[in-house]
Image (tube, rainbow, N blue to C red):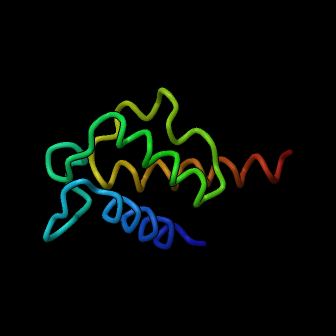
Amino acid sequence: MDDDGVRARARAAVIEMAPIQAVEVTGDTELAADLGYDSLGLVHLASILEEEFGITGAADEDAIGVETVADVEERLVRLLSERAIEGRHG
C-alpha cells in the first residue's frame, strides 16, 4: 500500500472512532479539541490502527506529540516505512 493509501485508511479510522462527528476532517483537525478524543480514546485508536496495519509502536511514548489527523497519518507512514526497512534487513 502506498503512503496515500495509508493516510486514507488512517483518516477513515480516526473519523469512524471519533467521539464527535465533524462535518469536515482535514489534516489540521485536532484529535482532542475537534473530534473529542481523550487519552483513553487515543490509546484505543492506536490499538485499532496497530491491528489494522499489523504494526506495533503506535501507542508508545513517541505518540505523545500526536495532536492532529495529519500527525496520525504521518506516524503510521513512518512506522510502516520502518517496518519495511527492518524487513529488508532482518
Q: Is residue 2 left or right of residue 84?
A: left
Q: Position of residue 10 (x, y in %)?
A: 43, 62
Q: Quadrant of the N terminus?
A: bottom right
50 vs 23: above or below: above
Residue 44: quarter of image: top left
The structure residue drawn at horizontal position 82% and vertical position 53%, both measured from the top left corner, is: 88
Residue 24: quarter of image: bottom left
Q: Quadrant of the C terminus?
A: top right
The structure residue drawn at horizontal position 22% and vertical position 64%, both measured from the top left corner, is: 26
Residue 73: quarter of image: bottom left
Q: Is residue 28 left or right of residue 13?
A: left
Q: Position of residue 5 (x, y in %)?
A: 50, 73
Q: Is residue 35 left or right of residue 62?
A: left
Q: Nearer the viewer, residue 38 or 80?
A: 38
Q: Position of residue 87 (x, y in %)?
A: 80, 51
83 vs 52: above or below: above
Q: How many marks?
A: 0
Q: Is residue 27 left or right of residue 72?
A: left
20 vs 60: above or below: below
Q: Residue furthest top?
A: 61
Q: Nearer the viewer, residue 76 or 34?
A: 34
The structure residue drawn at horizontal position 52% and vertical position 46%, both measured from the top left corner, is: 47
Q: Position of residue 17 (x, y in %)?
A: 35, 58
